[in-house]
Image (cartoon, coloured by chain):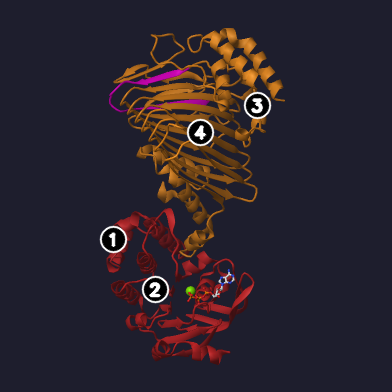
Amino acid sequence: MSSAVTEQIRKEYGAVHAALPASVIEPARRAEAIERLCAQGLPATREENWRYTNLRVLEHVRFAPIETQSQAVPPLPEALPGFVRYVFVDGLLRSGAAGSHPGLTVRSLRTPGPSSSATWGPCPDFPEARLALLNEAFATDALLIEAHANAAPAAIELVFAASAGAQAGASYPRVHVVLEASAELIVLERHMGAPEAASLVNSAVRADVGENARLTHYRLQHCAPRTAWFDTLTAQLAAQARYHLLTVGTGALTARSTVHVRLAGAGAELALSAAALADRQQSHDMYALSEHVAPNTRTTETFRGIASGRARVAFNGKIAVRERAGGSDSRQSLRGLLDGPEAEVDLRPQLEIYTDEVRCSHGATAGKLDQNMLFYLLSRGIAPQTAQHLLKWAFLEDVVAKIECAELRRQIERDLASQMSAAATLKELL
Amino acid sequence: MLKIENLHATVDGKEILKGLELEVPAGEVHAVMGPNGSGKSTLAYVLAGRPGYAVTAGRISFQGQDLLALSPEERARAGVFLGFQYPVEIPGVNNVYLLKAAINAARKQRGEPEVDAFEFLTLVREKMRLMRMDESMLSRGVNEGFSGGEKKRNEILQMLVLEPRLAVLDETDSGLDIDALKIVAHGVNTLRGPQRSLVLVTHYQRLLEHIVPDRVHVLVNGRIVRSGDRTLALELERRGYDWLIGEAA
Ligand SMILES: Nc1ncnc2c1ncn2[C@@H]1O[C@H](COP(=O)(O)OP(=O)(O)OP(=O)(O)O)[C@@H](O)[C@H]1O
Ligand SMILES: [Mg+2]
C-alpha cells in the first residue's frame, strides 16, 4: 500500500517538478528528497511512532501543490496588537509587510533575493522526519525569518489558510526561523482553512535558536474539518537558548505533528506545552523528541488532551539524554481526558538516558472527568453541562494559562470554548 | 424544614443507613454526633444527592417537597447546602467564578436576573472579612493548595454567600485551630434565623459551645439511637459511645 502511494508521489512529482520554484528549493535537492522518501518509504501504522496516526488519508489525496491560487481568503481572526501578520493562502504568501522590521528580516524565498547566511540543510536523518522530505520536494514558497543579534523583541504572526478542495492539490507551508545570539522573538503560526477545504497540508518548520536567544513559538491548528494536516518541526538550541513551544490543536480530520528539538548547547531550555481537543472522528497525534546533547539542559513538557465522541488523541513524548548531557533536568506531565465511551487517549512518556546525574520526573494519566469535582460543582447548584464544561476548561488551562500574550490567550480560550460548544455556558470566563 | 423517615441507603451495595429518622424544624440547629463509620457523612451525601448513594427505602421531605426527586443541582438551588468533610480541590476553576456561577444558578431558578457585578463583589468581600480570609484567595483555584483550615473556611464562605435554607455541615470544625473555630462559628451564627435550619455533624462538644444546638442526635450504625438537648453532647464527651452502642444492639 505504502509503495503504491510513493509511486503516486513520484508520478505527481514528475509531472510538476519543472514548474517548482528553484529559489525556494533547488531542483537537485527536490529530486534528492523524492529519492530519499521513496527509498525510506512513507511512515506506516506498524511503526512504533506512527501507531496512532491516520495514515490512510494519504491514499486519497493529491500531492502536487495547488496550481491556481484561489482568490478567496477565508475570514481571518482578529489581528493581535504588536504582531506583524503574514498571510499564506494554499501555501503561497498572499500578504504581509515585506522587507525589514527593526532587527528583523522576513522574506519569501519565492522571489529570489540576497543570499542569506541562514541555511536550512537537508532534512536530518531523523526517521520520523520523512514527511518533511515531502515538503522539501513540493514546497512552493518558504518564509525566512531572521532575528538579528541583540535586536529588540519582535512578534510575527503567520497565517496559513487553505482554500481549496482535495482534488485541487496539497499545500506545503515552509518556515525557517533563525534567532541570532540574544535575539528575542515571538512567532505565532495559525493553520486554518475554509470550511469546504479538504486538502492535504504538509508543513515543515525549522527553528535555529542562537546563544542566549529566546523564541516563543505559538502554533494553533484549527484547520477545516476535512483537512489532513501533517507537520514536521525541527529545532536546534544553542547554549543558554530558551525555546517555548506552545501548541493548541482543535481542527482537521487527522492531525499529526512531529517535533524534534535538539538541546545542543549547554544550559539550553525547552518548554513544550501542548493542548489537543478532538471530537467526532478526529485524530490528533503528536510525537515529540527532545534530545539533550549538552550539559545542564532542561525540558519541561506539558500535554493536556481531551477526546470526545469517537475521537482519538495521542501524545508520544520521548526525552533522550545523551552521554555528554550531565546535569540535565526533564519533567513531563501528560494528561488525557476521555469524554465518552468511544473516545481514545494514548499517552506515552519515554525516557532514554545514557548518563548519570540527571533529574527527571514524569507522569502520565488518562481518565474520565473527576467525579468528586463534578459533584462538588453540582452541589453548589451548577448545571451538569456547565460543570462538565468548566472542568474540561480547567483541564486545558494547564496549557492555555502559559500563554503570556493576554489577547492571544483570550482568543484561544474563546476558540476552545466554541469548539466544546461551551461558549454560552462559559461566557463569564471569556 | 427537613423530615427524614425510615431512611435506608446503600453505598456500593452495602447498607449504611438503616431506618434513620430525623426531623429538623425551621429555625433550629441540630447536631449529629456518632462514632467513626456510623454513617454521618453518608447521611450528608444522601441529602445532597451524591451519585452512588442509593436510597432503598424511606422518604425525605424538605420544605414540603420530596427531596429525593430532585437532582443535586436542583437541591442546591432549592436551598440545600452541604459543607464537605473533605472539600474538593478544583485547580483551574477559580473561587470567585464558582461563587458567582452558584449564586446565578439559584437566582435563575427563582426567576431573578443575574447578580450585579458590583453588588456581588461587595457581598463577597464582606463575607470574606467575616471569615478573615485573604482576598487573594478569590483568584485562586477552588481550594487549590488551601490548608485544611482554609478549605473549611472557604466552605463557610460559600455558605454565607449562598444563604441556604438548610445547611448540612459535615465536620466543618475538624482541622480548625482555636481562633479559626471561633471565626467559623461566628460565621455560622450570623446565618441563624427563623427561616433557616442547620445540621452540624461533629465529633466535638467544643463547636457546640460556640454554636449552641437546639437538639443533639446520636447516630450509631445507620440509625439515630438517641436524641436530647445540648446536655447530651456533654454526656457523650464524658462517657463516649460504648453505652449507646450496647443499647443499640
Ligand atoms: N464505597 C463504599 N463501599 C463500602 N462501604 C463504604 C463506602 N463508602 C463508605 N463506606 C462505609 O460506610 C460507612 C459509613 O461511612 P461514613 O463516611 O458515612 O461515616 P462517618 O460517620 O461520616 O464517619 P467519620 O466520623 O469517620 O467521618 C463506613 O463504614 C464506610 O467504610
Ligand atoms: Mg464523616
Which secondary structure dominates the residues rendered in magenta? Answer: strand
Of B78 and B234, the residue lying toward us: B234
Amino acid beneath label 4:
Leu
Q: Which mark is residue B134?
A: 1
- Of the image marks 3 and 4, the number of the one nearer the N terminus: 3
Q: Mark number for residue B174? A: 2
Residue A104 coordinates in the image, percent (x, y): 33, 20
Residue type pointed to by label 3: Leu
Secondary structure state at the residue bearing disc 2:
loop
Please tell me the numbered disc located at residue A289.
4
Please tell me whether residue A148 belongs to the stretch shown in magenta: yes
Subunit that carries the residue with mark 4: A
- Using the image, name the chain to which the residue with label 2 belongs: B
Crowdedness of circle 1 by 10 Å Cα count: few (<14), some, many (20+)?
Answer: few
Task: Tell whether A62 sits left or right of A316.
Answer: right
Q: What color is chain B drawn in?
A: red
* Tag 1 secondary structure: loop
Residue type, label 2? Ser
C-alpha gap between disc 1 and disc 2: 21 Å
- Marks 1 and 2 share the same chain: yes
Measure the C-alpha gap from mark 3 to mark 2.
62 Å
From this viewpoint, which residue is outermost toward the top? Answer: A18
Judged from the image, the secondary structure of the residue bearing numbered disc 4 is strand
Mark 1, ligand 2, within 8 Å: the answer is: no
Tint of chain A = orange
User: Height in image: A341 above or below A14?
Assistant: below
What stretch of residues is rendered in magenta?
A: A142-162
B119 lies above or below A304: below
Q: Which residue is mark 3?
A: A58
